[in-house]
């Protein structure tokens, strides 16, 4: 039962990764592409990590996986902000 | 089924790595090259993992994907004019000397690749592949650690590691010869500053974890040192003047700690009538941890010195 | 389960391949940096899946390091250095 749930979560994770990459490729400008990074990919990683944690059933590894997800979330949000601000400043200068 | 899929995965990973390497080399814009190189480092870490070499993957993740990228981007900012010029001129002109050097590098790389390919065929042909692994496995109980990589690096081939640390020490002398360090970064905005507030302790904690886990699982002084250095780099990027790098004599002690502790342990054993760096099995684990701790500090101090790009200036007030 | 993991790992590789097109095409350093960031996140996910597939739990530590250092490149990319000499 949990394995079915885990499989579903992992596949859902892959779906969001795919959506993120397609967004990065298809969206018209930098600011909309930022969404691919901060939303789709981080959600995809989160789903994948919950799926893996369910599959492994080891609380310590689950904790480490959770830490990885939190780190990626924070890093994704921060770097999206930094890149957007950088691009905005460039635009103002030009 | 799984094997086929992993084979396709390998082929795509290989194509990506080679493609990124090519694009990074072929680019006329230095900044583009650096960003491509960062992506190249990320994929290389995955590739080492795929090759069942987690020790190397850890080092590549910490140094290749994290520190080298920051180092190159920082170096690029010191000469913005020059980069802008190269971007504007469509066809960068190469002098005869440059072209010659390019061919020389290409030839040397080809020779190295040929040698590696040749040694690969030799491994498959003979029995040499298992001989080394078997020798390590047979003696691992006497090494004081259970991770074979740490056993080789810190015990069986400790000479090599000692000399590597000496190379790092020499590199620091080269960096200090460049003169005083760069002025540093402007104070970062609230978003990055709040990230550093919890990322820095987490990086220091992870460094300690990697150092400790190195005795029985992938990890060790190099990976831990690079992670510890990343904490300093993050603080520097946030615009701080105090980035945990000691000053004056304390810095000199930290930089020399790796080689110093190695020599101290080696010579002490020598005085006790054992071979140089021939640890008694009962003490090996503790001695290895002692040396690795010192080496971690030295490696971290070296990498941070490389990032600040010169000798740290004495206490200076901010503008 | 391992078959699913292999399929998802391969799927992630395809997704990363799409990201590579953006890093090669640009335009501009900002777009490339963004694509590199995406490759980092996908790399973390691939390492986690590989750790199960190859039975190498140490790869989770590699993913942890990549995750912790994910913001460093972007910060170095956007950070502005102080003028040396007159500050």
Image (cartoon, coloured by chain):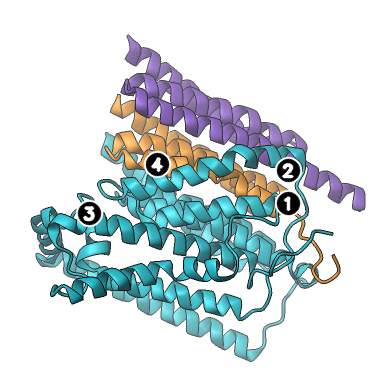
Chain colours: A purple, B cyan, C orange
**Dividing the image into 4 quarters, which one contains the C terminus of chain B?**
bottom right
Residue B63 pos. (x, y %): 49, 57
Is B289 placed above or below B101 here? above
Q: What percent of the width, then of the height, locates residue B227? A: 48, 51
User: Label 4: which residue?
Assistant: C61
Does B27 sit left or right of A56 as displayed? right
Residue B150 in picture, x, y percent from top left: 26, 57
Gap between marks 2 and 4, in whole Å? 26 Å
Of badges 4 and 3, nearer the viewer stands: 3
Reading the image, the residue beneath label 2 is: A82
Disc 2 crowd rating (10 Å Cα; few below 14, some 14-19, many 20+) is: many
> The N terminus of chain B appears in which quarter of the rendering?
top left
* Disc 3 versus disc 1: nearer the observer: 3
Q: CA distance from mark 4 to mark 3?
A: 22 Å
The verdict on a common chain for dots 4 and 3 is no
Label 4 neighbourhood size at 10 Å, few (<14), some (14-19), many (20+)?
many
Question: Badge 3 is on which residue?
Answer: B285
Circle 3: element type: helix
Q: Are marks 2 and 1 in contact (CB under 8 Å)?
A: yes
Look at 59% across and 32% down and name the residue there. A73
Give the quadrant of residue B196: top right
């Amino acid at each position: 039962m949990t394995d079915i749930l885990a499989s579903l979560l992992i596949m859902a994770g892959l779906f969001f990764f795919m959506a993120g990459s397609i967004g990065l490729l298809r969206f018209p400008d930098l600011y909309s592409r930022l969404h691919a990074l901060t939303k789709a990919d981080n959600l995809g990683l989160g789903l994948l990590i919950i799926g893996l944690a369910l599959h492994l059933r080891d609380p310590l590894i689950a904790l480490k996986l959770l830490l990885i997800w939190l780190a990626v979330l924070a890093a994704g949000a921060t770097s999206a902000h930094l890149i957007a601000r950088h691009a905005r400043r460039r635009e103002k200068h030009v | 089924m799984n094997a086929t899929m992993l084979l396709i995965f390998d082929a795509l990973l290989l194509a990506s790595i080679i493609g990124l390497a090519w694009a990074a080399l072929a680019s006329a814009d230095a900044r583009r090259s650096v960003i491509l190189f960062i992506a190249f480092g990320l994929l290389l870490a995955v590739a080492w993992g795929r090759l069942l070499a987690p020790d190397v993957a850890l080092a590549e993740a910490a140094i290749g994907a994290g520190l080298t990228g920051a180092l190159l981007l920082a170096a690029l900012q010191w000469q913005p004019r020059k980069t802008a010029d190269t971007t504007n001129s469509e066809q960068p002109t190469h002098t005869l000397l440059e072209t010659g050097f390019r061919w020389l590098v290409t030839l040397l790389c080809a020779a190295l690749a040929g040698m590696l390919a040749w040694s690969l065929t030799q491994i498959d042909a003979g029995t040499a592949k298992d001989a080394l692994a078997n020798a390590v496995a047979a003696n691992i109980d006497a090494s004081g650690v259970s991770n074979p990589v740490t056993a080789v690096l810190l015990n069986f081939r400790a000479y090599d590691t000692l000399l590597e640390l000496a190379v790092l020490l020499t590199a620091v002398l080269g960096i200090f010869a460049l003169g005083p360090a760069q002025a540093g970064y402007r104070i970062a905005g609230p978003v990055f500053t709040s990230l550093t507030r919890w990322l820095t302790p987490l990086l220091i904690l992870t460094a300690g974890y990697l150092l400790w886990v190195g005795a029985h699982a992938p990890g060790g002084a190099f990976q831990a040192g690079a992670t510890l250095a990343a904490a300093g780099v993050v603080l520097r990027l946030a615009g701080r003047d105090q980035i945990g790098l000691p000053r004056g004599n304390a810095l000199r002690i930290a930089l020399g700690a790796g080689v110093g502790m190695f020599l101290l342990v080696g010579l002490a054993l020598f005085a006790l009538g054992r071979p140089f760096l021939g640890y008694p099995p009962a003490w090996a684990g503790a001695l290895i941890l002692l040396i690795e701790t010192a080496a971690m500090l030295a490696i971290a101090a070296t990498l941070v010195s490389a990032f600040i790009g010169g000798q740290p200036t004495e206490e200076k007030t901010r503008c | 389960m391992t078959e699913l993991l292999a399929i998802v790992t391969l799927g992630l590789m395809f997704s990363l391949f799409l990201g590579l097109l953006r890093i090669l095409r640009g335009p501009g350093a900002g777009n490339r940096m963004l694509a590199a960031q995406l490759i980092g996140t996908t790399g973390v996910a691939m390492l986690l899946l590989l750790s199960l597939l190859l039975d190498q739990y140490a790869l989770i530590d590699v993913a942890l390091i990549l995750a912790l250092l994910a913001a460093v490149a972007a910060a170095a990319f956007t950070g502005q250095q102080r003028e040396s000499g007159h500050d």
